[in-house]
Image (cartoon, helix red, strand yellow):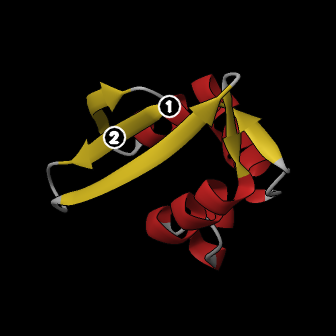
Amino acid sequence: MTRRDKLVERIRKRPPSAKFRDVQKLLERYGWTIARTKGSHMTFKNPVEERILTVTVHDDKVERVYLDRICIWLGLDSEDEAK
């Protein structure tokens, strides 16, 4: 299992919170970049899909509600991604 696969699995399990570094790595691997930072809010942008995702970070942790949204937008719950 590759590092990317392990990272995807950690996020797919939807823990109560995840490390911001893990979330950032995952989003960057799918083409998202940090567009801006304001306080505890990190805004990611995907230039291909023209989508914006704002994530709140506290103590270097991202809460489950954002993990749910990320999994839906990246299609991490689909059967094709699991293989």
How crowded pointer 1 is (Cα within 10 Å; few <14, some 14-19, many 20+) is rated as: some
Q: Residue at x 65, y 72 (%)?
A: 77
Q: Which residue is drawn at 14% across and 49% down?
A: 47
Residue projecting furthest to the front: 39
The front one of 71 and 38 is: 38
Q: What element carries label 1?
A: helix
The front one of 38 and 2 is: 38
How crowded pointer 2 is (Cα within 10 Å; few <14, some 14-19, many 20+) is rated as: some
Q: Quadrant of residue 57?
A: top right
Give x and y (percent) for residue 33: 29, 34
Residue at mark 2: 43
Give x and y (percent) for residue 5: 68, 42
Q: What element carries label 2?
A: strand
Residue at mark 1: 24
Q: Which amino acid does label 2 sit on?
A: Thr
Nearer the observer: mark 1 or 2; the answer is 2
Q: Which mark is residue 39?
A: none
